[in-house]
Amino acid sequence: EPEVTQTPSHQVTQMGQEVILRCVPISNHLYFYWYRQILGQKVEFLVSFYNNEISEKSEIFDDQFSVERPDGSNFTLKIRSTKLEDSAMYFCAVLARREETQYFGPGTRLLVL
Amino acid sequence: GESVGLHLPTLSVQEGDNSIINCAYSNSASDYFIWYKQESGKGPQFIIDIRSNMDKRQGQRVTVLLNKTVKHLSLQIAATQPGDSAVYFCAENSAGGYNKLIFGAGTRLAVHP
């Protein structure tokens, strides 16, 4: 199973502040995804990223969100101006070449105060 | 750790018994299905998958059954162990895994000694 790490593991921020969540895939992956899970709810898709561009995004992924893979390794999710309702666990997932299964990282717990 | 799924349906079983977790999926076009296990404070962990051209697939102590007629998926865990205690999510996908995963609501499995 491919290893995926995420940093930070926990982030507390004030409403209106910018946060950057990072995903560091260990192996050479092809597709990258961000999902979130609000406490007590199911995992929800945010965005998928392939060949250095967004391939699909959900309604949740509005103008406050952006993703990039600036150095060909780290895959980041930026929330420009956080809202209280952005508080959730954010998971990065990766899809390796010639595979079908998305593997998830351990998540970043974001708390917006 | 995080308490995920405070209001999830719960299946309570005795150690050594078999467990069956059910899931209804939504999209008739989905052709790939995955079961994930999520322990408290961690990301979803891949358990087993099945493609729509199959109706049964077995792994180590786990079996997934797919009934496309009624859009139903089940996960059977044989000889359930305390380490199996977690929240279990089914997820559906199309186009061979590259698209977004759509997660079900989840079921909490509680294994009692």
Image (cartoon, coloured by chain):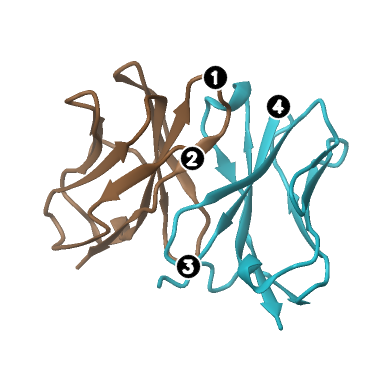
Residue that mark 2 sits on? A103
Residue that mark 1 sits on? A98
Q: Mark 1 lies on which chain?
A: A
Alpha carbons under labels 3 and 4: distance apart: 32 Å
Identify whether B25 is placed above or below B38: above
**Sequence order check, earlier mark of 2 and 1:** 1
Circle 3 SS class:
loop
Residue that mark 3 sits on? B40
Query: Given this view, does label 1 or label 4 mark the residue nearer the observer?
Result: 1
Residue that mark 4 sits on? B29
Q: Are marks 3 and 1 in contact (CB under 8 Å)?
A: no
Alpha carbons under labels 3 and 1: distance apart: 30 Å
Q: Residue at x 81, y 25 (%)?
A: B53
Identify whether A77 is placed above or below B52: below
Figure quadrant of residue A58? top left
Alpha carbons under labels 3 and 2: distance apart: 17 Å
- Assign the C terminus of chain A to one quadrant of the image: bottom left
